[in-house]
Image (cartoon, rainbow, N blue to C red):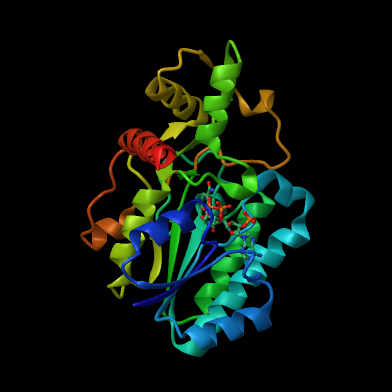
């Protein structure tokens, strides 16, 4: 199958290229062209004629989105719109990646997982811009799957962020005597390799619409950090603090766990627990270092 992947050297893009390597892939990075550049995108898509486009490209620096609101909307909303139009015009189906951060506004006291049928209300610019992208995809490309996931960690590291949460905690754990991490934001950490495998499964289906895909289980950033150091054998204590003690430019949801409700309806197997996925992250990371 001909598959065009945007953001191909990002965390998820890298794992998608690995998992889908048997297919005829066109992996696009920002060096090949910008999804905001309609002429580039249209030319590339109409020449390759993919059966499927997977759009992972996004401006993912959540705090920076607050300062660069226009850029956030340019990439996450209008970039997604371009991809949706290009897919529709060539008859490709589109798998577009979205986020748990479309939730968390207003209902800050939410304590049960969000399903695909809950109404998103974001609480920061990143979430707003991603939701605008989701809406374009829904309206402009008939055969779309919007995959919502959360707190991604992949061995490629989030290039745009210069690492990812796992790598940051490992570094801090080695450098400091103790580290302080917020314990009042709860979500489901998700390994991009597992997400890529699930996306590959979705390829052969006609499960159009929104689908939440996360590893099982949920935790706070403090619990996630504690498990990361434990798995790496680093004994540095992780002290729980509140979000009020660690102010950030972007507000974050206190609870953004995604219920993989649609997957259950479709009879898809639950993804493994995030702690098991984290163990595998360390194994894959080690193997890649040796290669
Ligand atoms: N990271 C998370 O915790 C998280 C959670 C939930 C959902 N998501 C969503 O999952 C998807 C993948 O995330 P990820 O963690 O794999 O992000 P990532 O590692 O930052 O990958 C995104 C890729 O998109 C590229 N990109 C940025 N702007 C672009 C543009 N205008 N045109 C073309 N390419 C562009 C980036 O290039 P540069 O590196 O050069 O900027 C990067 O390679 C995104 O849609 C994101 O919104 C992420």
Q: Quadrant of the C terminus?
A: top left
Q: How many marks?
A: 0
Q: Is residue 185 among what the camera can see?
A: no
Indicate the position of residue 287 as horizontal and vertical percent values. Answer: 36, 39
Q: Is residue 222 left or right of residue 231?
A: right
Q: Residue placed farthest to the top in the image?
A: 177
Q: Residue at x 28, y 64 (%)?
A: 201
Q: In the image, is residue 58 above or below residue 164? A: below
Q: Residue at x 44, y 87 (%)?
A: 91
Give the image quarter of residue 52: bottom left
Indicate the position of residue 193 as horizontal and vertical percent values. Answer: 37, 50
Query: Which is nearer the eye, 147 or 285?
Result: 285
Q: Is residue 283 left or right of residue 139?
A: left
Query: Where in the image, quadrant-wise, is ligand 1 located?
Result: bottom right
Q: Residue at x 30, y 75 (%)?
A: 206
Q: Residue at x 58, y 74 (%)?
A: 136
Q: In the image, is residue 289 above or below residue 4? A: above
């Amino acid at each position: 199958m001909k598959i065009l992947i945007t953001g191909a050297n990002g965390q998820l893009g890298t794992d998608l290229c690995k998992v889908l390597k048997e297919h005829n892939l066109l992996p696009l990075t920002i060096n090949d062209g910008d999804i905001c550049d309609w002429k580039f995108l249209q030319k590339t898509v109409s020449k390759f004629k993919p059966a499927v486009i997977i759009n992972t490209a996004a401006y993912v620096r959540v705090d920076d989105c607050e300062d660069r609101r226009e850029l956030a909307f340019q990439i996450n909303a209008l970039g997604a719109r371009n991809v949706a139009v290009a897919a529709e015009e060539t008859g490709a189906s589109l798998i577009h990646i979205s986020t748990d951060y479309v939730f968390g506004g207003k209902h800050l006291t939410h304590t049960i997982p969000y399903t695909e049928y809950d109404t998103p209300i974001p609480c920061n610019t990143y979430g707003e811009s991603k939701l605008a992208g989701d809406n374009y995809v829904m309206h402009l490309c008939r055969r779309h799957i919007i995959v919502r996931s959360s707190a991604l960690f992949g061995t490629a590291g989030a290039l745009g962020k210069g690492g990812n949460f796992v790598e940051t905690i490992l570094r801090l754990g080695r450098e400091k005597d103790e580290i302080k991490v917020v314990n009042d934001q709860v979500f489901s950490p998700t390994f991009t390799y597992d997400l890529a495998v699930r996306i590959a499964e979705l390829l052969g289906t006609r499960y159009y619409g929104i689908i939440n895909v996360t590893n099982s289980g949920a935790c706070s950033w403090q619990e996630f950090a504690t498990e990361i150091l434990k798995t790496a054998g680093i004994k540095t204590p992780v002290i729980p603090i509140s979000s009020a003690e660690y102010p950030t430019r972007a507000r974050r949801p206190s609870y953004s766990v995604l219920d993989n409700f649609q997957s259950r309806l479709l009879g898809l197997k639950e993804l493994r627990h995030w702690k098991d996925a984290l163990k595998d992250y360390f194994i894959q990371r080690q193997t890649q270092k040796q290669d």
